[in-house]
Image (cartoon, rainbow, N blue to C red):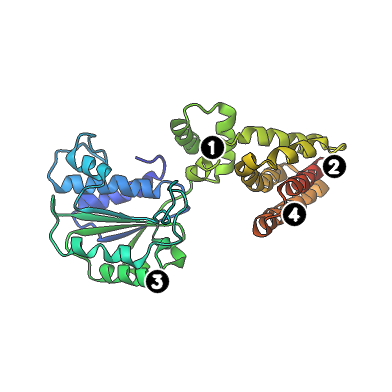
């Protein structure tokens, strides 16, 4: 089970025990906080219960349970998961299509045309429902939500529920998930990254913004070293420009593209974290520097600015904190 959001988990568990589980649920909250992981755990439990299996309390299902084995193999007849798929010709599996097409929603039709095969339930997960192609795929889903196939439970993951069709939202029971606290994020990261040292875990927690998934996107980029460089510039300044020059050259290398992207995110957040400890003119400088850093980060991405020049300029903004 995902760590955190115990209240949301308990609410869904109570609905399962009630015997009157709503047919469509909207798991809403920031990206990367465990909504999809919980949806998958809930799906396994729902389908395993439907077979009459003797299960422990909560959402646990034994590893050797047939339902769990079939879902892991992608061959359970009563389970479907719709996500964005890799683009045609992509061998890495990382270059995903922009949306979930209507054809994938319509492909659920044959399953809905028959009774559930292994129990009295089916489960369909859409991760994320925000990615449905509009208007076709959204309208196709809406039809299923309006006339739900017997025994079917929809678990819809949404990072931005306000962007969904109001008619989709109105047919779902919304379950809200909140950002995780730092302790919970650290626990998730230590389990996922057993070789990471304390400094790296602490650096990842600082960039997480409540989302372990966001933090994992920065894993392996040695954020602790970036933070050390920013701290040195912010606290001691860089009158000779040596520190910012060294940092700019290191992050401009082609092999450092991912660290450069992380730096564009980290620098404004670093300045923001410095501001609360300041007062008067020093606080004003920090706030102005934060605005400048955010603007530069956005412009650098939008216009694909030269990496070395961008890092040099960003480090100069950070150096204002030492004045």
State which mark lies toward you, 3 or 1.
1
Mark 4 crowdedness (10 Å alpha carbons): few <14, some 14-19, many ≥20: some
Are the residues tagged 3 and 1 within 8 Å (C-beta)? Answer: no
Rendered position, 182 above or below 146: above
Q: Residue furthest right?
A: 240
Question: Percent x, y for residue 49?
Answer: 17, 46
| Dot placed on the residue nearer the N-terminal end, 2 or 3 | 3
Give how far apart the Cα atoms at labels 4 and 1 are.
26 Å
| Dot placed on the residue nearer the N-terminal end, 4 or 2 | 4
Q: Quadrant of the C terminus?
A: top right
Name the foreground residue: 107 vs 71.
107
Residue bearing mark 1: 219
State which mark lies toward you, 4 or 2.
4
Left or right: 177, with 150 as reference point: right
Name the foreground residue: 195 vs 174.
195
Question: Percent x, y for residue 8?
Answer: 36, 49
Residue bearing mark 2: 323
Give how far apart the Cα atoms at labels 2 and 1 are.
32 Å
Give how far apart the Cα atoms at labels 3 and 4 are.
37 Å
Give how far apart the Cα atoms at labels 4 and 2 are.
16 Å
Q: Residue furthest front?
A: 89
Give the quarter of the image for residue 23. bottom left
Residue bearing mark 3: 166
Task: Please give the count of numbered marks on the rendered protein.
Answer: 4
Are the residues tagged 3 and 4 within 8 Å (C-beta)? Answer: no
Q: Secondary structure at mark 2?
A: loop
| Dot placed on the residue nearer the N-terminal end, 2 or 1 | 1
Q: What number is the disc on residue 292? A: 4
Give the quarter of the image for residue 244. top right
């Amino acid at each position: 089970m995902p760590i955190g959001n115990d209240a949301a988990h308990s609410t869904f568990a109570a609905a399962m025990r009630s015997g009157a589980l709503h047919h469509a649920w909207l798991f809403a909250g920031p990206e990367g906080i465990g909504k999809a992981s919980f949806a998958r755990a809930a799906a396994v439990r729902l389908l395993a219960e439907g077979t009459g299996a003797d299960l422990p309390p909560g959402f646990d299902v034994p590893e050797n349970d047939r339902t769990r084995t079939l879902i892991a193999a992608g061959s359970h007849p009563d389970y479907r998961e719709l996500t964005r798929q890799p683009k045609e010709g992509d061998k890495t599996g990382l270059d995903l299509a922009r949306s979930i097409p209507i054809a994938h929603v319509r492909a659920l039709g044959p399953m809905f045309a028959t009774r559930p095969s292994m129990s009295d339930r089916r489960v369909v997960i859409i991760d994320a429902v925000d990615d449905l192609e509009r208007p076709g795929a959204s309208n196709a889903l809406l039809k299923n939500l309006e006339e739900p196939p017997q025994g079917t439970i929809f678990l819809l993951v949404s990072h931005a529920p306000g962007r969904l069709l109001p008619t989709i939202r109105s047919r779902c029971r919304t379950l809200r998930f909140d950002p995780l606290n730092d302790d919970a994020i650290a626990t998730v990261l230590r389990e996922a990254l057993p070789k990471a040292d304390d400094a790296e875990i602490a650096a990842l927690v600082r960039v997480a913004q409540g989302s372990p998934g966001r933090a994992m996107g920065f894993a392996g980029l040695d954020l602790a070293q970036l933070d050390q460089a920013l701290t040195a510039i912010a606290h001691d300044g860089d009158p000779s420009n040596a520190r910012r020059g060294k940092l700019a050259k290191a992050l401009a290398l082609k092999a450092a593209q991912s660290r450069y992207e992380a730096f564009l995110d980290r620098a404004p957040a670093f300045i923001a974290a410095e501001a609360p400890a300041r007062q008067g003119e020093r606080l004003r400088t920090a706030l102005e520097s934060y605005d400048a850093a955010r603007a530069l980060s956005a412009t650098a991405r939008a216009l694909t600015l030269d990496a070395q020049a961008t890092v040099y300029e960003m480090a100069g903004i950070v150096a204002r904190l030492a004045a």
